[in-house]
Image (tube, rainbow, N blue to C red):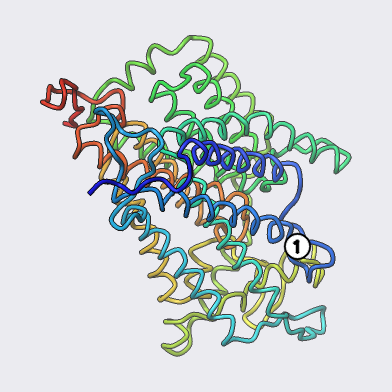
C-alpha cells in the first residue's frame, strides 16, 4: 500500500526539523555560559532547566507527530535511493523496536524512581546537634522530572531530525563545543575573579565535563572516518582530546582508556581503511595534537590528584550498609532521595558544608552518591537496577553487533561513558551533560537501525565508506558487505 499523503508540505517539515536542531545547539551553547541547573527564584527552587525544557519538548513532540503522520511503515525508496527526508520508522509508523525499548525502559526507570518518593520519608540532619529536618517532596521529585526531560530532549532531537541531517547536526554540535568550551571556561574564570586551573563550564563541572568533550571527540572521529569534513573533524577531535586532559579528571582518563580499548577490540580484526587514513594524517595534526596533550597534562593538576583519597568509597559503603535490612529493602531500595537528597542542598533550601559531607539517617555521606550505579542500587533496589540494565542493553548489544566504522566509533564513545557513570551521578543529575549523552545514545541506535535497514534493501550510501563491497543486482549499484 502506498504511504499516505503528507498533511503538511514535506519541505516545510524538513526545514522545521532543521530549525529544531538549531534550537538544540543554541540551548547547549546557552547552558555552556548560563547556569540553568541552579535554583530559579520564585518557583519553589525549581531549576532553570525545569523552566526552559517544557517549551523545547512540546515543540519537538508537535514536529514528531506531524512527521509520523506523513510516513508509512518504514523508509521509502525513491529512484533507487533512500528518501533523504525520511526518518527511521518501524511497524505502525513508530521508531524502531530497539529505540522504543531504550526509551520505554528509560521512562520505566524514572517512573519507578518517582514512585518510590511517595512511600518514603526524606529527612536530613543539620548541625552538631543533628536536628532533623524533613525535606519537601518537590525537592526530591523536581530533579527526577528534569532527568525525564533530558532524556526526552535527546530522543526528540534525533527522531525529528531527518536521516540525512543527523551527521551534520552532530558535527555542528562537536564543532560548536570547541569555542563554547573556551568561552565557558573564560566565563567561569572571570566570574570567580581568578584563573580556574581545571577546565569546566556552566554545562558541567570539571568532574563531569570529560563526558561532554569525549562525546564531542567521538563525533568528530566518526565524521573523519565517514569523510565528512575530514580535515576539520580531525582538528576538532584533537581540541577535544586536549580539553579532556585539561579537566584534570581521573574518571576522564579512565573513560578515554576504555574508549581506546573498545575501538581496538571492535576494529582490530576488520578492514584497514580507517588505519590507512590515520597513517595519511598531516604531520601537523599529529605534532600539534601530541604537543597539546603533553602540555595539557603538564600544566593541569591531574598528576598530583591521582593519589588523593576520595569520599566516594565512604559514601558508597554507607549506602550499601543501609541495604542490609529485610528483603523488601533490598528488592525495592530505600527510595529515591532518602539517603542522598542532593537537591535539598544545591537548591539552597539547606546550606551545604564546605566538606560536601553531610549527616543523615543512614550515616555520614557525600551529599550525592557520585555514582549512577550505586544510587540506583541503593535507592531503587534490585528492581531499579534491572530496569537500568534493561535500558542499557540495546547500546551494549549494538556495540557487539558492530556495523560501519563510523557507527562503531559512536557506539564505543557512548558505551565508554557507561564506565564513567561509575564515578559520578549522571542521568539523575548533571542534566546538560546527561542530555548530550542521551542525544548521542539515541542517535547511535537510530543510525544502527538505518544501517540494518540499508543492508536488507541494498542501499550502500548509508553504510560506512571503508567496508568491502561486492556487485549486486540492485540497479547496478554496489552493496557493502562486512567480512
Relative vertical location of residue 265 with respect to residue 339 in this rendering, above or below: above
Q: Identify the residue under disc 1.
A: 355
Residue for point 48% across, 83% down: 324
Between residue 395 and residue 266, name the one nearer to us.
Answer: 395
Q: Where residue 345 sits in the image (x, y, percent)?
A: 75, 68
Count up the numbered dots: 1
Could you say which is closer to the camera, residue 480 or residue 71? 71
- In percent of width and height, residue 418 lies at 45, 52
**Quarter of the view holding residue 52:** bottom right
Q: Residue at x 53, y 19 (%)?
A: 232
User: How many C-alpha atoms fall within 10 Å of the one at disc 1: few (<14), some, or many (≥20)?
Assistant: few
| Residue 275 x/y as whole percent | 33, 20
Q: Is residue 10 left or right of residue 462?
A: right
Looking at the image, is 292 positioned above or below residue 183? above
Outermost residue toward the bottom?
Answer: 326
Tell whether 84 sits left or right of 240: left
Image quadrant occupied by the C terminus: top left
Residue that extends furthest to the right in the rendered view of this protein: 193
Instruction: Look at 55% across and 25% down and name the residue there.
Output: 236
**Element under label 1?**
loop
Counting from the top left corner in percent of width and height, residue 109 is at 46, 69
Q: Is residue 96 visible?
A: yes
Position of 357 relative to 243 (above/below): below
Residue 190, picture quadrant: top right
Q: Is residue 375 left or right of residue 143?
A: left
Q: Residue at x 47, y 66 (%)?
A: 107
Q: Specify the quadrant of the image occupied by residue 335.
A: bottom right
Residue at the far top in the pictured view: 283
Could you tell me if residue 312 is visible in this image? no
262 vs 414, nearest the viewer: 414
Amino acid at each position: 500500500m502506498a504511504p499516505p499523503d503528507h498533511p503538511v508540505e514535506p519541505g516545510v517539515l524538513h526545514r522545521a526539523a532543521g530549525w529544531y536542531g538549531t534550537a538544540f545547539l543554541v540551548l547547549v551553547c546557552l547552558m555552556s555560559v548560563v547556569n540553568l541547573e541552579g535554583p530559579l527564584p520564585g518557583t519553589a527552587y525549581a531549576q532553570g532547566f525545569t523552566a526552559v525544557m517544557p517549551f523545547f519538548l512540546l515543540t519537538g513532540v508537535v514536529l514528531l507527530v506531524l512527521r509520523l503522520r506523513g510516513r508509512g511503515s518504514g523508509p521509502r525508496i525513491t529512484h533507487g535511493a533512500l528518501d533523504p527526508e525520511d526518518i527511521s520508522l518501524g511497524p505502525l509508523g513508530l521508531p524502531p523496536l530497539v529505540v522504543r525499548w531504550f526509551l520505554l525502559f528509560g521512562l520505566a526507570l524514572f517512573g519507578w524512581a518517582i514512585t518510590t518518593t511517595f512511600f518514603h520519608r526524606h529527612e536530613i540532619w543539620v548541625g552538631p546537634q543533628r536536628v532533623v529536618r524533613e525535606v519537601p517532596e518537590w525537592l526530591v521529585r523536581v530533579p527526577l522530572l528534569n532527568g525525564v526531560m533530558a532524556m526526552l530532549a535527546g530522543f526528540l532531537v534525533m527522531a525529528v531530525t531527518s536521516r540525512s541531517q543527523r551527521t551534520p547536526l552532530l558535527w555542528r554540535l562537536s564543532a560548536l563545543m570547541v569555542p563554547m568550551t573556551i568561552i565557558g571556561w573564560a566565563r567561569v574564570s572571570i566570574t570567580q575573579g581568578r584563573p580556574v586551573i581545571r577546565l569546566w563550564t556552566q554545562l558541567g563541572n570539571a568532574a563531569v565535563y570529560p563526558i561532554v568533550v569525549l562525546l564531542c571527540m567521538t563525533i568528530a572521529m566518526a565524521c573523519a572516518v565517514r569523510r565528512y569534513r575530514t580535515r576539520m573533524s580531525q582538528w576538532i577531535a584533537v581540541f577535544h582530546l586536549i580539553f579532556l586532559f585539561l579537566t584534570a579528571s581521573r574518571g576522564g582518563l579512565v573513560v578515554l582508556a576504555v574508549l581506546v580499548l573498545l575501538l581496538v577490540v571492535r576494529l582490530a580484526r576488520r578492514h584497514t581503511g580507517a588505519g590507512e587514513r590515520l597513517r595519511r594524517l598531516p604531520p601537523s595534526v599529529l605534532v600539534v595534537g601530541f604537543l597539546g596533550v603533553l602540555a595539557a597534562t603538564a600544566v593541569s593538576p591531574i598528576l598530583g590528584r591521582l593519589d588523593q583519597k576520595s569520599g566516594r568509597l565512604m559514601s558508597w559503603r554507607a549506602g550499601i550498609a543501609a541495604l542490609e535490612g529485610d528483603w523488601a529493602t533490598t528488592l525495592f531500595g530505600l527510595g529515591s532521595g532518602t539517603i542522598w537528597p542532593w537537591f535539598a542542598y544545591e537548591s539552597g533550601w539547606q546550606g551545604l558544608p564546605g566538606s560536601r559531607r553531610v549527616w543523615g539517617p543512614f550515616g555520614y555521606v557525600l551529599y550525592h552518591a557520585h555514582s549512577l550505579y550505586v544510587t540506583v542500587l541503593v535507592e531503587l533496589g534490585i528492581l531499579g537496577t534491572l530496569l537500568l540494565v534493561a535500558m542499557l542493553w540495546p547500546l551494549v548489544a549494538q556495540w557487539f553487533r558492530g556495523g560501519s566504522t563510523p557507527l562503531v566509533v559512536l557506539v564505543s564513545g557512548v558505551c565508554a561513558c557507561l564506565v564513567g557513570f561509575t564515578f559520578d551521578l549522571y542521568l539523575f543529575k548533571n542534566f546538560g551533560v546527561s542530555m548530550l549523552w542521551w542525544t548521542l545514545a539515541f542517535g547511535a541506535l537510530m543510525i544502527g537501525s538505518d544501517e540494518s535497514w540499508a543492508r536488507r534493501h541494498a542501499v550502500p550510501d548509508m553504510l560506512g565508506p571503508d567496508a568491502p563491497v561486492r556487485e549486486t543486482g540492485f540497479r547496478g549499484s554496489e552493496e557493502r558487505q562486512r567480512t
